[in-house]
Image: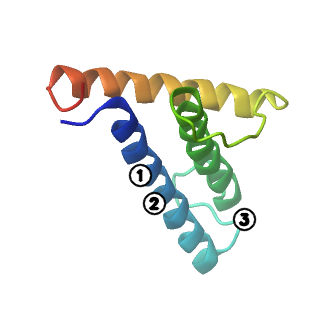
């Protein structure tokens, strides 16, 4: 069974792989390409995935001695997305707890 730190490290790895995925797609198709029926360009998607990744870093900072520093409060869009990501991570953390997979 995972503890909270292990859970957040799993989320960090997941987000890092999503950053890698969009980076590879952007390398292939370019910064300003957007998929059919997708409202965001690859550039915007990179931004979103990086915010998600950095949000998990913030959560690890809060709960461990990771001590990685950056400021999301300067940009309202980043702060808003970061807050939404925190809520989503917390939701699935609670779900994992209910399933008995984390403490």
Q: CA distance from mark 2 to mark 3?
A: 21 Å
Q: Which residue is pictured at 57% across the width and 27% down the height?
A: 62
Instruction: Give left or right: position of 18 versus 47.
Output: left
Q: CA distance from mark 2 to mark 1?
A: 5 Å
Q: Marks 1 and 3: which is nearer the front?
A: 1
Q: Is residue 21 above or below residue 38?
A: below
**Which residue does the numbered mark 3 point to in the structure image?**
32
Residue 59: image location, x then y, percent? 54, 31
**Which residue does the numbered mark 2 point to in the structure image?**
17
Q: Which mark is residue 14?
A: 1
Give the SS element for disc 3.
loop
Q: CA distance from mark 1 to mark 3?
A: 24 Å
Which of 98 and 5 lies nearest the eye of the viewer? Answer: 5
Q: Marks 2 and 3: which is nearer the front?
A: 2
Choose top left, top right, bottom left or bottom right for residue 61: top right
Which of 74 and 28 lies nearest the eye of the viewer? Answer: 74
Q: Which residue is pictured at 51% across the width and 28% down the height?
A: 63
Circles 2 and 1, Cβ within 8 Å, touching? The answer is yes
Give the SS element for disc 1.
helix
Mark positioned earlier in the residue sequence (2 or 3): 2
Residue 42: image location, x then y, percent? 64, 60
Instruction: Give left or right: position of 91 versus 12.
Output: left
Which of 44 and 80 lies nearest the eye of the viewer? Answer: 80
Q: Which residue is pictured at 72% across the width and 34% down the height?
A: 78
Residue 77: image location, x then y, percent? 74, 31
Residue 55: image location, x then y, percent? 59, 36
């Amino acid at each position: 069974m995972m503890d909270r730190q292990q859970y957040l490290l799993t989320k960090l790895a997941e987000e890092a792989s999503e950053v890698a995925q969009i980076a590879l797609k952007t390398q292939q198709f370019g910064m300003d390409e957007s998929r059919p029926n997708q409202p965001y360009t690859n550039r915007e998607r990179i931004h979103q995935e990086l915010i998600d990744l950095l949000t998990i870093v913030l959560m690890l900072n809060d709960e461990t001695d990771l001590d990685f520093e950056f400021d999301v409060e300067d940009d309202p869009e980043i702060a808003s997305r970061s807050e939404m990501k925190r809520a989503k991570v917390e939701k699935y953390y609670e779900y994992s707890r209910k399933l008995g997979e984390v403490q």
